[in-house]
Image (tube, grey):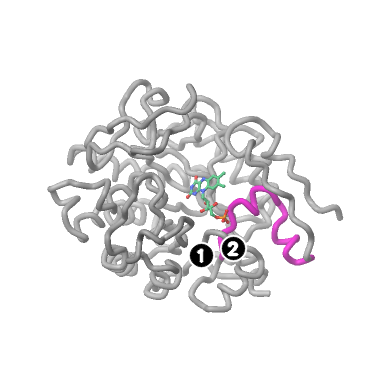
């Protein structure tokens, strides 16, 4: 089975072709510091070829949701060191997913400060989970050019911090409507300067950040997650995602990355006739980097996807959340634990570190 075969990622050999997809679990403390429970959570899943962490805030400004972890001060870095050491001691490889939430946040969890975004356009028709319950989104503050340049630098510093914390690399979270995705989007980015108005300008922020990450930590250690056909968080990526994302993938081809991580659309595309039905195929086929495919895969469809030859790794989200020993379950055709939706975000060990493993 290809899923259980070794894969080369950058300069590393992964023990199988299964990644754990990044998943926010909201179990850090109010200072963005992860605990020993988080050490256990990732260690339990170290049989994945590649562990992608939950999204990690790159700066205080990046924060959008309560109890999400960060990576911009020494206490936060030191806490992650325990995670990476334990994962490495168990033979795992772990990348940190770098996060700036942009407009997907709320002032109640940002010391009273409004979220920031490419343009002053709030999310409509959805509410945000905050420490004070569900709240309507606010209108974010439009970023100045100086602030944009500072955020690019913040990503570079966070990548250096990730390496100091012992991570094997970093992944830019450029999917699902967070800040980089807001820059890419026709509906969230109405800027008239060099960061908006044309495909090239909307792609500029992501490319500048990717360049900064590579400059900060070197080649073969940087990946990116993209969701060209996901319109969650009021993201209309483009009336023509191929016109937007193909030039982006081609520009990424010129950087020494370790992978691109592509999500297929998870939402109905009936009202989006121009959206490609299979993002992995449409965009992965023009990438010269290793492709990680995600969203909705099980053992059989994951294996079939690898057989097609475009993706070399499959990222599993909820299956890995509920089944810490997922590769072993695939290998032995074992039953799967079911995901408990009520314990996905926040809380303690319940639904975090107490999913049963197969007995020896
Ligand atoms: C509890 C939970 C939290 C998630 N948090 C993140 C996140 O922090 N970053 C991210 O890129 N995707 C996040 N996702 C999306 C997953 O990475 C993945 O794209 C999605 O679950 C689809 O994969 P699956 O069908 O294998 O679960 C999250 C998903 C879940 C279930």
Query: Measured from the top left, where is residue 173 in percent x and y?
Result: 42, 50
SS of the residue under disc 2: loop
Whether disc 2's CB lies below 8 Å from ligand 1 is answered yes
Characterize the local packing of mark 2: few (<14), some (14-19) or many (20 or more) Cα atoms within 10 angstroms.
some
Q: Is residue 268 above or below residue 27?
A: below
Viewer-nearest residue: 198 or 222: 198
Q: Which mark is residue 297?
A: 2
Quarter occupied by the N terminus: bottom right
Residue in front for this viewpoint, 40 or 228 = 228
Identify which residue, 292 or 11, lies in the foreground: 292
Of circles 1 and 2, which is in front? 2
Q: Which residues are magenta?
A: 314-332
Q: Position of residue 183 (x, y in %)?
A: 27, 49
Q: Residue 84 at x, y = what percent?
A: 59, 46
Q: Quadrant of the C terminus?
A: bottom right
Residue pictured at 68% horizontal, 41% vertical = 40
Residue, disc 1: 293
- The location of residue 278, given as percent across then percent down, is 45, 69
């Amino acid at each position: 089975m290809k899923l259980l075969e070794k894969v080369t990622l950058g300069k590393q050999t992964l023990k199988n072709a299964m990644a754990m997809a990044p998943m926010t679990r909201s179990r850090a403390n109010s200072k963005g510091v992860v605990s020993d429970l988080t050490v256990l959570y990732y260690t339990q899943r170290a049989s994945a070829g590649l562990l992608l962490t939950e999204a990690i805030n790159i700066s205080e400004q990046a924060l959008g949701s309560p109890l999400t972890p960060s990576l911009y001060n020494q206490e936060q870095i030191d806490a992650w060191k325990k995670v990476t050491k334990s994962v490495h001691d168990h033979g795992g490889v772990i990348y940190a997913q770098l996060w700036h939430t942009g407009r997907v946040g709320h002032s109640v969890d940002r010391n009273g400060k409004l979220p920031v975004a490419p343009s002053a356009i709030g999310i409509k028709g959805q509410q945000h989970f905050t420490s004070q319950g569900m709240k309507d989104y606010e209108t974010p503050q439009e970023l100045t050019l100086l602030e944009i340049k500072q955020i690019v630098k913040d990503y570079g510093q966070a990548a250096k911090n990730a390496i100091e914390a012992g991570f094997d690399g970093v992944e830019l979270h450029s999917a699902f409507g967070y800040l980089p995705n807001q820059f890419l989007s026709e509906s969230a980015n109405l800027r008239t300067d060099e960061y908006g108005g044309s495909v090239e300008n909307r792609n500029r922020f992501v490319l500048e950040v990717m360049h900064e990450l590579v400059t900060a930590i070197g080649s073969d250690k940087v990946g990116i997650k993209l969701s060209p056909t996901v319109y969650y968080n009021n993201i209309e990526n483009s009336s023509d995602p191929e016109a937007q994302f193909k030039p982006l993938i081609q520009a990424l081809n010129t950087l020494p990355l370790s992978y691109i991580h592509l999500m297929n659309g998870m939402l109905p595309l009936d009202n989006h006739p121009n959206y490609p039905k299979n993002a992995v195929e449409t965009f992965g086929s023009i990438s010269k980097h290793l492709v990680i495919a995600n969203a909705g895969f099980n053992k059989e469809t994951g294996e079939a996807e690898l057989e097609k030859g475009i993706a070399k790794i499959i990222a599993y989200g909820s299956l890995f959340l509920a089944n810490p020993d997922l590769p072993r379950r695939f290998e032995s055709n074992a039953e799967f634990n079911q995901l408990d939706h009520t314990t996905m975000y926040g809380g303690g060990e319940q639904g975090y570190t107490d999913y049963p493993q197969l007995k020896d």
